Amino acid sequence: MSMYPGSALPPLRDVIDRHELGAKKALGQHFLLDLNITRKIARLSGLERSETVVEIGPGPGGLTRALLETGADMIAIERDRRCIGALEELKPHYDGRLLLVEDDALIADEPALLALHGVNGTVRLASNLPYNISTELLIKWLKVTPRWWTSMTLMFQKEVGDRILAQPGSKTYGRLSVISQAMSKPEKGFVLPARAFTPAPKIDSIVLNFTPNPDISVDPLLLEKITAAAFSQRRKMLRSSLKAIFGNEVEAKLEEVGIPATRRAEDVPVKGYVKLCELL
């Protein structure tokens, strides 16, 4: 007997052909079919048998299979109705541990959904994110309180992942870097070449793992407001770019938190922005 309960399932390419699941560019879809890679993502997530995982945009079910192999329960949220039939075929192979929800992840109320289906406590989140809405989804999940996830294991275009992980002083350091690193602890998992996907995107991808950041507590709306002002004119000094928020007191406020008024947005560390939020 195979160690994997889903081993009797048909190959994903057959599922895609039978259900006519050509990836839709408008939905940012790029399917990941290599089970060795999806199992690697599942291992990175740290998912255990006793837990529940939410998957966003499962598509034909490549990552879904690997996550279910861990023995965990799953709630899969899929917007593309074409994929529901293919995902339904997985249910008999995994002892009823798969719940399918047809919904748009951008507007889905995950805490309410979990409560509706009797899931208590926090869960893990895993996804090969649709590239065209990946940052919007990330910010949504980072901002929500109380936090409903213990970890997020997410796939991004590599250039987006680089921005999330960027450090002060680098060209890629910006709003996304600050918000991601203030609201969580993002860590690099591994890089995937474009050829690993069907269809192949134009650039490589990266898997990141996010855990809550217990060292920082900040109002996400204030953080968005301050970083928007600072990075909208990233080559300007902060005494100029933040004047709209702090008015004539801008230099005094910057001095209060130990940031030189002549510093530019890209040179301020994450904790500097957190301190500025505390002033408001």
Image: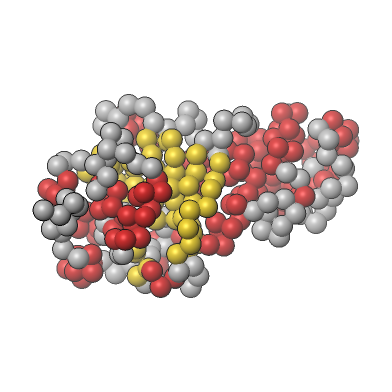
Report x, y in % for residue 65.
Answer: 25, 53
Residue displayed at 40% across by 45% down: 45
x, y percentage for residue 60? 26, 59
Can residue 225 be seen here? The reply is no
Does residue 73 appear in this view? yes
In the displayed structure, 257 sits above or below 194; it is: above
Q: Quadrant of residue 274?
A: top right
Q: Is residue 257 left or right of residue 16?
A: right
Residue at image coords 66%, 35%: 222
Q: Is residue 66 left or right of residue 226?
A: left
- Report x, y in % for residue 149: 42, 36
Q: Quadrant of residue 220?
A: top right
In the image shown, does 178 or 193 lie closer to the viewer?
A: 193
Is 260 left or right of 27, judged from the image as shown?
right
Tell me what residue is drawn at x 55 percent, y 39 percent: 184
Q: Is the residue 100 above or below the residue 2 in the image?
A: above
Coloring basis for residues: secondary structure
Q: Residue at x 38, y 65 (%)?
A: 30
Q: Report the front residue among 197 and 224.
A: 197
| Quadrant placement of the C terminus | top right
Percent x, y of residue 214: 57, 30
State the count of labels.
Answer: 0
